[in-house]
């Protein structure tokens, strides 16, 4: 199967090929190297995932995220000061749970687009569970560097509990929630809502446990 995206430029079409190979048994398993389109692929979100499927049709090894913000698809490089982080990460395979993310990852927010470039940067343990520090990064469409706008820490025990101070984003990306989780992974104390653009306090809510 081949996926083609074409654009008209200087009286000629330029095409970019994607896709890959399915198995011959009729089970529609993807095999080998693939270029998958993001589920929300559109003109403002030209994102592809490049990697490999094993013989069981599971993602394995390194998968890169590529984003077209101009005339060509490029590996997403999350630039923070002098450090560069590549978009995507690695998959492992477990017979019981199938494919799982392992190690360091740079993931896209669900509503990622040219004008809403937000990523989540952190680590998965060998069981595919988020652990340790996770940062929320943001970049304007015309900027080079990503800036940290939120995040916090997950416990190291593998229960994926948020602990300590966190800055979270709302679904619409406009409001941040600033507060603290206790050791049980429950919100406690006062959580402040901030307007990210106006940088003003929007409200607050008190949690008691």
Image (cartoon, grey):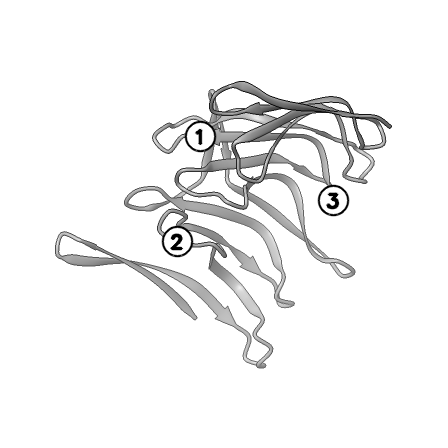
Q: Decide: is 152 above or below 41.
A: above
Residue 22 drawn above or below residue 163: below
Question: Which residue is label 3 attached to?
Answer: 126
Q: Distance between the residues labelled 1 and 3?
A: 30 Å
Q: Which of 46 and 40 is in front in this view?
A: 40
Q: Residues within 10 Å of mark 1 (few under 14, many from 20)?
A: many
Q: Is mark 2 on a helix, strand or loop?
A: loop
Counting residues from the start of the chain, the first of labels 2 and 3 encountered is 2
Residue drawn at 49 percent across, 30 percent down = 138
Q: Which mark is residue 42?
A: 2
Mark-to-mark CA distance, 2 and 3:
33 Å
Question: What is the x, y in percent for residue 48?
Answer: 45, 52
Q: Quadrant of residue 89?
A: top right
Q: Which of 96 and 138 is in front in this view?
A: 138
| Residue identified by numbered label 1 | 139
Residue 111: x and y in percent read 50, 45
């Amino acid at each position: 199967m081949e996926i083609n995206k074409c654009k008209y430029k200087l009286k000629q079409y330029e095409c970019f090929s994607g896709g890959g190979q399915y198995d011959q048994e009729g089970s529609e398993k993807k095999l080998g190297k693939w270029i998958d389109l993001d589920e929300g692929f559109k003109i403002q979100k030209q994102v592809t995932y490049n990697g490999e499927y094993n013989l069981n049709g599971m993602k394995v090894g390194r998968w890169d995220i590529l984003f077209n913000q101009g005339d060509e698809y490029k590996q997403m490089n999350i630039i923070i000061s002098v450090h560069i982080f590549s978009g995507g990460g690695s998959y492992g395979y477990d017979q019981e749970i199938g494919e799982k993310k392992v190690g360091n990852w740079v993931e896209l927010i669900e509503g990622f687009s040219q004008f809403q470039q937000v990523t989540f940067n952190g680590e998965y343990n060998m069981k595919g569970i988020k652990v340790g520090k996770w940062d929320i990064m943001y970049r304007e469409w015309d900027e080079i560097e990503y800036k940290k706008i939120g995040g916090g820490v997950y416990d190291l025990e593998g229960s994926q509990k948020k602990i300590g101070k966190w800055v979270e984003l709302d679904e619409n990306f406009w409001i941040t929630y600033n507060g603290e989780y206790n050791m049980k992974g429950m919100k406690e104390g006062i959580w402040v809502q901030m307007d990210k653009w106006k940088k003003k306090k929007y409200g607050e809510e008190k949690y008691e446990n």
